[in-house]
C-alpha cells in the first residue's frame, strides 16, 4: 500500500509541476550585461595547432606534416609557429595549412564585414616575404571543392627581426569575388612568394571583429506542425537591443490558403534574459485554441514571418515523418545497391561489399562482414552503436506494433508479409552476427577504413597501434550485442525460428566471453578510438537482463541481482538524460522488467529510482524557456538524441511499470514539445531533420552524400544539433557564446551536423508515438506458427482461430499475392482453415501469411513447409576455380547425385544459363563450358543448380586471371618524383584509348613496390581530376611476392568519379608513407619510374576493368 501512495504522490507532483507555470505579463526590462553578444576573438593558433604542411624543393621544416611549434620563440607568454625553408630547387613550392577548427569548416560571416586577421610576427633576417590567406571547402561546388585566396604579407608590414603586430582586413584575405565561401572556411594558408628561403615565427593568430553575434529568425515554430487537439505555441525571441516585440504585442496566425488571420493573440514574456542557451529575450505565442486543419504561419508586426507549418490530425502529420525517419536506415545500408524503385533521387552503387575483410591483427584472416548500416557520416560499422539503434527500434515495435506494417517503407523486402521495420533491423542483425569471433564468443568492435576520406585499408579493427594489444574483442561491444541479440530472439521467434535461435545462441556465447573476461576490455586504439566505453557495467547489466528475459536462466538473474544497485548514479545525475550507446542502464532494466519472473525487490527499487528520474525531466522541461529537457546549457555532441530519447524512455518505463495512463498528459506534453524543439522551436530556429521545414538542415556531414553530386540528403536525416564543445572551448573558440547556438549546417561540420543510426532510432520511436493512439483494438490469431509436410500421406489442413475484437477479416496475403477464399482457405465463424491443397503448392521453407482486418494491425502466421518424401540432390565438387588466361582455360565438370530428381536448370543469380551453350549434360554429369566461364568477372561466381524436387545446390567458382600482360582500352602514363625518401609519390595519368566511355568505378590500378620493412602504411590523394574524395586505395600483399614487388597498392574510384570518355584522361597525385615515416628505397621498385619529369606510357603499373587486365605487365 505504501508504494501505491508514493506513486500517487509522484503523479500528483507531475500535474502540479506541469500546469502551474505562471504567465509573465509585465513589460520586459534591460537585463543583459554590457558586451554580452560581442563576437569573441577567434583564435586560430595560441598554443596548439593542426593542419598540413608540405613542399616540393623548398625543404620546408615540418613535424608530423605540420608546421612545428617553437616553444623557445615565446612572445606575450605564447609559443610560435615556425615557417622555415631552405634555398629551393626549381620548380618548387610550399604550402602550410593551419586549420581554423580542426579540419571542420567555420562560418566567418559575422566577422567578415569589419573583421581582421591579427598576429605577431618576426623574421630571422628581416625582409622575408610570403603569401597568406584562407582556404574554404565546399563540396559539390562546380568550381571545385576548395578555393584559396591570398595576399602578400609585405602589403601590410615589413618583417624585421623584432616582433611586430599585424592586422589584415578579412575582406582582403577572403576575396569573395574569386568565389571563396566565407561561411565554410577550414584553413589559414601560408604559401611561397617567389623562390627565396625564409625563416619567420608567427604568434597568437586570431580573427577579431568589433561586431555582434548574428541574429536568427525571430519566430520559432515546429516546422512540421501541430496536432489539432494538442498544445500549439510559437516562441518569439531575439537580442534585447534589436527585438521590437514586448509583452502584450499582438501576434496573428495566418492561413496561407486564404492569407487571412485565423487566430490572434498577445505575446507573453517567458524569459527576460536567457543568459545560457541563447542570450535572448523570449516570448510565447500560444494558439492552442486554433484547431482548424490547414497550413499557417505566425506573424508579428515588424518581424520576419515564421516558417510555414501545418495543423491537422496527429496521424496525418507524423505518419509521413515516421516513414522518412525510418527509411533513413535503408539509405545507410551497406552491401547493397541503393536503387529504384526504392529511391529515385539518391541512387548509388554499393561502396563496401565487405564480403572479405581482413583482421587488422592478422590480414591473412578474412571474414565476411557484409550487410549492416553505415553508422553515421563515415563508412564505418560499429557494434555498440548498432545495438543501441536496434534496441530503440525493437522497443518501438514491441510497444506499438500497430504502427508498423509490411510494405510501409518501400524497401526491397516489402511485400514479404513481415513488418518492414523488422526486415530493416534484420539487415543490421545479420551483419552483427558476423562480427562475433566463433572461437571465443567475443565481438569485434568495428569494421572501417583507417582513412575515411580516402577509403584506405578497410579492416576489422582488432589491435592497437599505440600499444601491443592485439586480437581485441571488447567487453562493451560483446555485452551490448548480447543484449540486443537476446531481444531479437523474442522479436523473431514467431517469424523465423531458426534465425531467432541463431541470435540467442550468439547472445549466450557472448555471455560466456563476458564471464571469462570480468575486466573491461576497451575498444582498439588506432590513434582514434570511437565508441570507447570506460565502464562496461551497464552494458553487462543489459546483457544479463535481456538474456534473463529470453531464457529465464538463473545465472542471468543472479548477475542482475548482484549488480543492479550499482546503477543508482545514473538516476541521480543532475544534468544527464537517458541511456545511450555507452551507458545502457535503463535499457537493462526495461529488459529485466519484461522477464517472466522479475525479482520484487528489483522492481520496487527501480520504481523509486525511475520516478526520481522522471520527476527531474519534467522539472527541467518546465524550467526551460525553450520547453526542452536540456538543463544549464548542457548541449553536447548529439544532443538531439537525448531530446528524443528522454521522452522515449519516459514512455517505455511507465508502460512497463503500469503507470503510463496516469502520467499520459504529462508524457504527451513533454513528447510533443521535444519534437517541437527538434523541428525548429530551438535557439537557431532550424529543423534538425532534413526535408522537414522551410529552414531545415540541408548539409549533414556525410562522406557519402557530400560527393554524390546531388543536392543535400534524403528526407528524414536527424543531425546532432548544438554542441557547446564543438571547438576549442578552452580558448573561447565556440561557434557562439551561447550554448544553444553552437551549430552550423555544413557538410564539413561533424560535431554539430553529423547524423547516426542511434539518433534516428530514438526519433523513430517518438515519431511513432506522436502519430497518436488508435481507438481500434487489434485482432489476433492463434497459432502464430505452424508446420506443413508436403508428403501426401502427411498433408493436413491448418486451422487458425481469430480473436476479432469487433473487426472483420478482409483477406489473407502471401507476400503480395492474395489467397482465394473457398479455394485456398475457408472461414467458419471465428476459424480460418488453410487448405492443404494450397499449402502443398508452396515451396519448402518458411511461408509468411498475413491476415488483414477491417481495422487495426494485421497478424502473421509463419508456416514451416517441409517435404519428407523427397531426397535432396547433390553436386560434386561444390567449389572450383577458373583461370581466364587463354592458355589455362578449361571446362569444369560437375557430377550430379540426383536421388530420383532431375536437373531443371542452372542460374547465376537471377540469370539462367543456356543448356548446350553455357553447359552440357551427359547422364549424371554437367560440363560448364570454358567460353561461359571466361565471360565471368574476376572474383567469386555462384552457380545454383535447381532440381525438380528437394533443395537446390550451389557451386562456387573462384575466377582469376593470370594473364601476364594486357593491351585493352585504357593505358597508364606515369612519372615519379624521387628515388629515396619517406614517401612514394607516383603521378599517374589514366587514358581511355577506346571508343566508348568507361565507368571509373570498374577500374583498378596496381602500383607494385617493396615495403622495405613491414610497417603500417597510410595513403593520401592530394589531387585528382575527379576529386580526391572519389579516389580509393587499398594495401595488398601479393599471393606470390617477388623482389621489388612484395606489396601492391590498389587504386580505385567511387561511383562519384563518374565515367572516363573515349580519348579523355584523368590525373591522380598520391602519396604513400609508413606510419613511422621511415624511408623507402624505391630504386628497385617494380612500378617506380627511375627517370622522367613528365607523363609517359608505363607498363609496370597495371590497369584492370571489372577485374580483367587491360594494361601493363604484372611482375
Image (tube, helix red, strand yellow):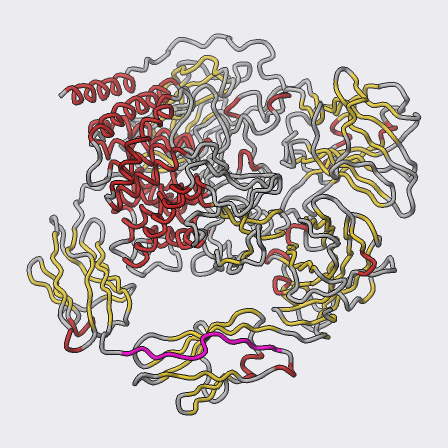
**In the image, farthest residue toward the bottom:** 922
User: What span is colored magenta in the figure?
Assistant: 871-884
Residue at 87% x, 36% y: name it: 85
Q: How many marks?
A: 0
| Res. 679 in view | no
Left or right of 720 in this view: 597: left
- Out of 363 and 99, give the one closest to the viewer: 363
Please determine whether, in this image, residue 527 is positioned above or below residue 144: above
Left or right of 186 in this view: 897: left
Residue at 49% x, 40% y: name it: 755
- Give the image location of residue 500, x and y in percent: 30, 54
- Out of 681 and 614, give the one closest to the viewer: 614
Please determine whether, in this image, residue 508 is positioned above or below residue 218: below
- Magenta residue check for 181: no
- Out of 292 and 185, give the one closest to the viewer: 185
Q: Quadrant of the N terminus?
A: top left
When asked about the image quadrant of residue 130, the answer is top right
- Give the image location of residue 25, x and y in percent: 37, 11
Amino acid at each position: 500500500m505504501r508504494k501505491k501512495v508514493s506513486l500517487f504522490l509522484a503523479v500528483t507532483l507531475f500535474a502540479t509541476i506541469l500546469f502551474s507555470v505562471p504567465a509573465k505579463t509585465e513589460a520586459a526590462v534591460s537585463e543583459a550585461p554590457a558586451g554580452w553578444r560581442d563576437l569573441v576573438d577567434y583564435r586560430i593558433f595560441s598554443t596548439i595547432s593542426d593542419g598540413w604542411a608540405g613542399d616540393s624543393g623548398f625543404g620546408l621544416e615540418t613535424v608530423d606534416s605540420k608546421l612545428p611549434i617553437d616553444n623557445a620563440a615565446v612572445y606575450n607568454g605564447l609559443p610560435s609557429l615556425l615557417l622555415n625553408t631552405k634555398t629551393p630547387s626549381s620548380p618548387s613550392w610550399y604550402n602550410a595549412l593551419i586549420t581554423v577548427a580542426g579540419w571542420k569548416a567555420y562560418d566567418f560571416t559575422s566577422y567578415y564585414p569589419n573583421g581582421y586577421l591579427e598576429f605577431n610576427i618576426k623574421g630571422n633576417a628581416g625582409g622575408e616575404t610570403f603569401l597568406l590567406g584562407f582556404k574554404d571547402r565546399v563540396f559539390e561546388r562546380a568550381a571545385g571543392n576548395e578555393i584559396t585566396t591570398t595576399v602578400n604579407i609585405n602589403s601590410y608590414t615589413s618583417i624585421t627581426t623584432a616582433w611586430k603586430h599585424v592586422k589584415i582586413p578579412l575582406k582582403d584575405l577572403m576575396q569573395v569575388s574569386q568565389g571563396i565561401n566565407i561561411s565554410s572556411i577550414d584553413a589559414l594558408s601560408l604559401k611561397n612568394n617567389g623562390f627565396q628561403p625564409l625563416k619567420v615565427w608567427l604568434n597568437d593568430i586570431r580573427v577579431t571583429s568589433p561586431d555582434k553575434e548574428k541574429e536568427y529568425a525571430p519566430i520559432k515554430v515546429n516546422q512540421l506542425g501541430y496536432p489539432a487537439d494538442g498544445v500549439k505555441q510559437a516562441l518569439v525571441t531575439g537580442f534585447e537591443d534589436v527585438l521590437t516585440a514586448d509583452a502584450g504585442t499582438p501576434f496573428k496566425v495566418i492561413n496561407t490558403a486564404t492569407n487571412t488571420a485565423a487566430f490572434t493573440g498577445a505575446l507573453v514574456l517567458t524569459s527576460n534574459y536567457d543568459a545560457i542557451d541563447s542570450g535572448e529575450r523570449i516570448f510565447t505565442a500560444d494558439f492552442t485554441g486554433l484547431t482548424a486543419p490547414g497550413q499557417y504561419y505566425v506573424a508579428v508586426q515588424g518581424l520576419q514571418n515564421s516558417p510555414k507549418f501545418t495543423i491537422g490530425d496527429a496521424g496525418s502529420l507524423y505518419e509521413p515523418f515516421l516513414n522518412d525517419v525510418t527509411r533513413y536506415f535503408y539509405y545507410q545500408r551497406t552491401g547493397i545497391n541503393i536503387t529504384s524503385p526504392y529511391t529515385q533521387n539518391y541512387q548509388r552503387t554499393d561502396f563496401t561489399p565487405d564480403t572479405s575483410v581482413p583482421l587488422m591483427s592478422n590480414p591473412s584472416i578474412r571474414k565476411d562482414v557484409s550487410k549492416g548500416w553505415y553508422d553515421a557520416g563515415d563508412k564505418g560499422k560499429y557494434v555498440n552503436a548498432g545495438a543501441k539503434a536496434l534496441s530503440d527500434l525493437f522497443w518501438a515495435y514491441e510497444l506499438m506494433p500497430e504502427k508498423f506494417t509490411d510494405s510501409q517503407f518501400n524497401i526491397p523486402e516489402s511485400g514479404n508479409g513481415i513488418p518492414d521495420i523488422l526486415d530493416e533491423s534484420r539487415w543490421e542483425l545479420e551483419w552483427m552476427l558476423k562480427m562475433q569471433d566463433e572461437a571465443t564468443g567475443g565481438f569485434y568492435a568495428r569494421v572501417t577504413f583507417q582513412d575515411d576520406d580516402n577509403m584506405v585499408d578497410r579492416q576489422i579493427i582488432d589491435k592497437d597501434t599505440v600499444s601491443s594489444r592485439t586480437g581485441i574483442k571488447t567487453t562493451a561491444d560483446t555485452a551490448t550485442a548480447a543484449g540486443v541479440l537476446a531481444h531479437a530472439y523474442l522479436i523473431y521467434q514467431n517469424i523465423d525460428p531458426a534465425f531467432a535461435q541463431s541470435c540467442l545462441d550468439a547472445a549466450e556465447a557472448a555471455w560466456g566471453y563476458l564471464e571469462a573476461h570480468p575486466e573491461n576490455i576497451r575498444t582498439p586504439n588506432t590513434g582514434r578510438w570511437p565508441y570507447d566505453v570506460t565502464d562496461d557495467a551497464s552494458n553487462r547489466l543489459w546483457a544479463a537482463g535481456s538474456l534473463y528475459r529470453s531464457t529465464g536462466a538463473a545465472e542471468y538473474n543472479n548477475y542482475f541481482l548482484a549488480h543492479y544497485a550499482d546503477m543508482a548514479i545514473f538516476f541521480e545525475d543532475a544534468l544527464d538524460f537517458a541511456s545511450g550507446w555507452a551507458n545502457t542502464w535503463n535499457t537493462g532494466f526495461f529488459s529485466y522488467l519484461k522477464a517472466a519472473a522479475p525479482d520484487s525487490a528489483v522492481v520496487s527499487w527501480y520504481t523509486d529510482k525511475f520516478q526520481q528520474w522522471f520527476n527531474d525531466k519534467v522539472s527541467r522541461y518546465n524550467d526551460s524557456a525553450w520547453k526542452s529537457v536540456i538543463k544549464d546549457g548542457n548541449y553536447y555532441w548529439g544532443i538531439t538524441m537525448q531530446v528524443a530519447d528522454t521522452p522515449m524512455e519516459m514512455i517505455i518505463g511507465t508502460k512497463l511499470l503500469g503507470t503510463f495512463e496516469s502520467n499520459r498528459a504529462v508524457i504527451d506534453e513533454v513528447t510533443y514539445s521535444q519534437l517541437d524543439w527538434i523541428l525548429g522551436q530551438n535557439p537557431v530556429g532550424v529543423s534538425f531533420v532534413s526535408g522537414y521545414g522551410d529552414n531545415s538542415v540541408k548539409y549533414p556531414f556525410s562522406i557519402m552524400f557530400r560527393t554524390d553530386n546531388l543536392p543535400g540528403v534524403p528526407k528524414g536525416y536527424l543531425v546532432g544539433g548544438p554542441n557547446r564543445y564543438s571547438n576549442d572551448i578552452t580558448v573561447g573558440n565556440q561557434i557562439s557564446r551561447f550554448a544553444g547556438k553552437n551549430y552550423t549546417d555544413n557538410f564539413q561540420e561533424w560535431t554539430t551536423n553529423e547524423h547516426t543510426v542511434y539518433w534516428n532510432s530514438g526519433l523513430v520511436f517518438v515519431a511513432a508515438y506522436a502519430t497518436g493512439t488508435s481507438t481500434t483494438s487489434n485482432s489476433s490469431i492463434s497459432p502464430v506458427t505452424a508446420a506443413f509436410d508436403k508428403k501426401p500421406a502427411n498433408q493436413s489442413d491448418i486451422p487458425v482461430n481469430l480473436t476479432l475484437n469487433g473487426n472483420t477479416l478482409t483477406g489473407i496475403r502471401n507476400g503480395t499475392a492474395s489467397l482465394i477464399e473457398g479455394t485456398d482457405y475457408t472461414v467458419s465463424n471465428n476459424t480460418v482453415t488453410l487448405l492443404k491443397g494450397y499449402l502443398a503448392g508452396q515451396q519448402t521453407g518458411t511461408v509468411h501469411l498475413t491476415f488483414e482486418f477491417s481495422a487495426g494491425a494485421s497478424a502473421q502466421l509463419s508456416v514451416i513447409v517441409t517435404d519428407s518424401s523427397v531426397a535432396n540432390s547433390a553436386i560434386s565438387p561444390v567449389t572450383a576455380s577458373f583461370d581466364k588466361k587463354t592458355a589455362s582455360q578449361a571446362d569444369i565438370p560437375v557430377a550430379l547425385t540426383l536421388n530420383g530428381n532431375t536437373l531443371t536448370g542452372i542460374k547465376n543469380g537471377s540469370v539462367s544459363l543456356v543448356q548446350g551453350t553455357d553447359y552440357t549434360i551427359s547422364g549424371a554429369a554437367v560440363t560448364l563450358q570454358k567460353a561461359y566461364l571466361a565471360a565471368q568477372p574476376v572474383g567469386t561466381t555462384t552457380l545454383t543448380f535447381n532440381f525438380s524436387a528437394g533443395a537446390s545446390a550451389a557451386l562456387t567458382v573462384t575466377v582469376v586471371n593470370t594473364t601476364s600482360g594486357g593491351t585493352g582500352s585504357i593505358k597508364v602514363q606515369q612519372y615519379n618524383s624521387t628515388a629515396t625518401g619517406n614517401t612514394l609519390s607516383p603521378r599517374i595519368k589514366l587514358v581511355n584509348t577506346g571508343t566508348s566511355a568507361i565507368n571509373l568505378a570498374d577500374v583498378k590500378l596496381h602500383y607494385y613496390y617493396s615495403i622495405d620493412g613491414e610497417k603500417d602504411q597510410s595513403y593520401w590523394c592530394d589531387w585528382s581530376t575527379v576529386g580526391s574524395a572519389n579516389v580509393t586505395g587499398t594495401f595488398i600483399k601479393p599471393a606470390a611476392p617477388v623482389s621489388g614487388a612484395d606489396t601492391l597498392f590498389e587504386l580505385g574510384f567511387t561511383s562519384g568519379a563518374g565515367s572516363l570518355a573515349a580519348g579523355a584522361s584523368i590525373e591522380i597525385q598520391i602519396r604513400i608513407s609508413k606510419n613511422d615515416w621511415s624511408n623507402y628505397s624505391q630504386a628497385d621498385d617494380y612500378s617506380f619510374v627511375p627517370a622522367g619529369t613528365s607523363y609517359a606510357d608505363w607498363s609496370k603499373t597495371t590497369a584492370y576493368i571489372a577485374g580483367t587486365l587491360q594494361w601493363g605487365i604484372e611482375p
